[in-house]
Image (cartoon, rainbow, N blue to C red):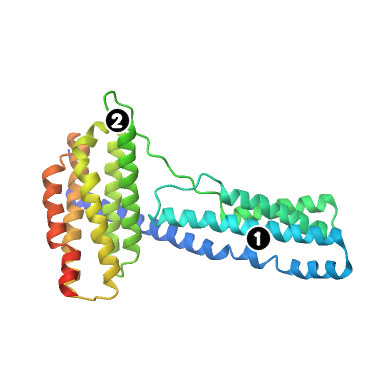
Amino acid sequence: MIGDPRRVGAVNVRVGAVAAAKASLARLRARLTMATSAALFLLPLPLMIVIAGALIADDIERLTLAASALASFWMAGVLTWRGLASEMGYVLGERIDLDRIPRKFMGALLTAGGAALAALTANHSVVGAATFAALGGVGHLCFYGLDMRVRRVTVTPVDGLDVASIADQLEQAHLRLRRIDAAANAIAVPEFRSRLARITAAGRDILAEIARDPGKASRARRFLNLFLDSTERVTAEYARTHSGIRSRPLEENFRKLLLDMEQTFSQQQRKLLETDVVSLDVEMEVLSARLKQQGVSDYVEKRI
């Protein structure tokens, strides 16, 4: 039995706010750490002075140690930057998966090696070099973090169902939801960002329920393949044009679409939990038709 609609609505509002805050924080952290990867290229630059001095003094051992330390730091910077770029692309919905190579961890190992070589260049003992290596590796991991790991969609095995195909559909659906989050972050209107966060939060709950009971996937095909795609395209279109076109009719039209989408997601989420059936076909068809016929894309084309 469904609870008080006002209480359910209040819960959805809180969920949307939390989801929006988490998504914004993840994107901000990704961008900041991308920028801070430059430290691995800039901080070791004083080693260039050591290399120049070793060349002048014809000190081959010191030259080799300093050059190797500089190369280690710069290789760590390249690996770390690529790892952060991969994670940022995943957070923004630009890629469905992450690299399997633990680039940031490999960068930490190279940073540790570079710190040890730099210490040996400065005539520290082996124990001192090992201490610097430990501090460098741990500091790298504390500063940049461990490599992000994707939480794989786990679908409950059911006889007679192609579980692998359903898992692929759910992965694509999660990708679309991340893209909607990314597009929402570019929208200046806080109300729209909050509503989109509630929509994607409800969408993830629906996907989780389908993964738990994949027998519902056949009734949710329209949701997985059509409605989410239409929602993503309309949101991305609005995010792309909103900064250049400040139109009250356009904002009102998008607000009505968001209200309909939010209501449809909430209804399907409740039906999913209440009746154990995802009866998406008719309502999704009606709303998808409206997204195509009265959506932001058509309106923008007329305005332009």
Q: Quadrant of the C terminus?
A: bottom left
Res. 122 in view: no
Q: Is mark 2 on a helix, strand or loop?
A: loop
The three-letter code of the residue at mark 1 reads: Trp
**Where is residue 121 drawn, in percent x and y?**
82, 60
Q: Quadrant of the N terminus?
A: top left
Q: Which corner quadrant of the image does residue 13 belong to? A: bottom left
**Where is residue 14 drawn, in percent x and y?**
30, 55
Picture disc at residue 162: 2
Neighbour tally class for label 2: few under 14, some 14-19, many 20 plus, Cα within 10 Å? few
Res. 36 in view: yes
Residue drawn at x 48%, y 59% is 30
User: Does 34 sit left or right of 74 as displayed?
Assistant: left
The three-letter code of the residue at mark 2 reads: Asp
Q: Which of marks 1 and 2 is nearer the N terminus?
A: 1
Q: Which corner quadrant of the image does residue 164 belong to? A: top left
Picture disc at residue 74: 1
Which residue is nearer to you in this view: 127 or 106?
106
Residue drawn at x 29%, y 42% is 207
- Examine the rendered structure and indicate whether residue 62 appears above or below residue 161: below
Residue drawn at x 11%, y 44% is 282
Q: Are marks 1 and 2 in contact (CB under 8 Å)?
A: no
**Where is residue 291 drawn, in percent x and y?**
16, 58
